[in-house]
Amino acid sequence: MEKSKPHKDAPQDSEKQEGRSDLAEFLTSHKSERHVIVLQEFPDPDAIAAGYSHQCISGHFDIETDILYSGRISHQQNLALVRLLGIELTRFDSSVDLSGYDGAVFVDNQGTSAGSITDELENKKVPPLVIIDHHEAQNRLSPQFKDVRPDIGATATIYAQYLKEGIIKLDKTNKIHTMMATALTHGIITDTRGFIRARPEDFYAAAYLSEYRDSDLLDQIMNQARSKQTMKVIYKALGSRETVESYSIAGVGYLRAEDRDAIPQAADFLITEENVHTAIVYGIVSGEDWEESVIGSLRTNRITIDPDQFIKEVFGKDAKGQYFGGGKVSAGGFHIPIGFLSGTDDEEFREQKWEVFDDQIKQKIFAKIGASPDGSKEEGKQ
């Protein structure tokens, strides 16, 4: 575990011990402040649940909070989660003033997948106070309180542990507590792929939450039909995929920003194919208020593949030294801004641009796995 300081002006000279008492002590030292809770650009159920839980917990310590993200919420389950539970999320853009916050809290991310908000917080000199996450360490920020556990299946599990240890006392009759437990259960289920990738801590957390969750509401959230557009993207991924060395690699062309969540769903689908252990799906995502970027998702069921290391080695870093992506056990993602080549309505140019990025991504992946597009091994590769 990382060091934390018990008060915002105290020196960081004591080792942080794992447990709710440390977070409670930290939040107590920041009583009556206003914090911004930062989610990744495209928040998943784990991020939304963790953000909502941190907001609920902060309220017990007289801390005012807002939850921000900068991308889109488009996955059917994510939309249902937010709407049915009444979770208030603010989409960040240039009109949002961050200067009024006393500090920032990063949940289910470490600033690298929330780049625009992270950069603006630094510009406004809003300090990073807290990081609570289950991904591999990214070393982008230096918060005062850091609880990063890559050996746990979901950030929601960490928050469930805080609750179980008594950071606040849950009450079955309290609607907010019920919604929080329901959201956290959904976060654990989705981030562990229905408990297939769950660790013992995740099972214990879900068992604890089962006493407080609303099972009917959870069922309604989880049983949302795929949209027609998502089905089209999955169909396109099936048609364009190249299978090499048990990797299924598919480019799906251009997508609207609101359809971005179809990419990880397509990756989830491709990995179910026989003799495929890793699926990578990517496309160029654009929108009126969205920076045109290559967005991709990786799914793997091979224990010898570390998604975080794989993506970092394949796609590298930007000019600021920040990686274009990363991951956790069995899953990862990448986000590469197109920059100067962004935009244009010219179909021929768009097609040429896609071909260039599609070829470049495949070349990098093939080089990493030591194979050629025809399935043969490259000389000297294993």
Image (spheres, grey):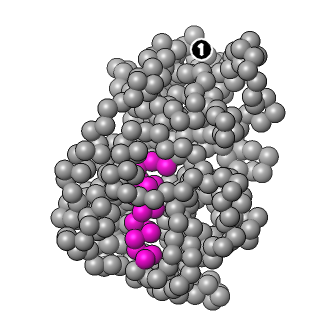
Query: Can you see residue 289?
Result: yes
User: Of the residues shown, which amino acid type is indicated by label 1?
Assistant: Pro
Q: Considering the image in quadrants, where does the C terminus appear?
A: top right
Residue 232, x across and y down, in percent: 45, 20
Residue 174, x across and y down, in percent: 24, 71
Q: How crowded is mark 1: few (under 14 residues within 10 Å), some or many (20 or more)?
A: some
Q: Determine whether, in the image, residue 171 is placed left or right of residue 85.
A: left
Front residue of 241/226: it is 226
Query: Can you see residue 293?
Result: no
Circle 1 sits on which residue? Answer: 373
Front residue of 200/211: it is 211
Identify the residue at image location x=37%, y=57%: 86
Residue 127, x across and y down, in percent: 67, 72
Identify the residue at image location x=48%, y=36%: 261
Identify the residue at image location x=70%, y=54%: 94
Q: Is the magenta stretch mostly helix, strand or loop?
A: helix
* Residue 50 lies in the magenta-colored region: yes
Q: Determine whether, in the image, residue 176 is placed left or right of residue 148.
A: left
Q: Determine whether, in the image, residue 339 is placed left or right of residue 333.
A: right
Residue 54, x across and y down, in percent: 44, 68
Say which element carries label 1.
Answer: loop
Quadrant location of residue 285?
top right
Quadrant location of residue 48?
bottom left
Residue span colored magenta? 43-59
* Residue 141 lies in the magenta-colored region: no
Q: Determine whether, in the image, residue 33 is placed left or right of residue 24.
A: right
Identify the residue at image location x=43%, y=39%: 75
Q: How many marks?
A: 1
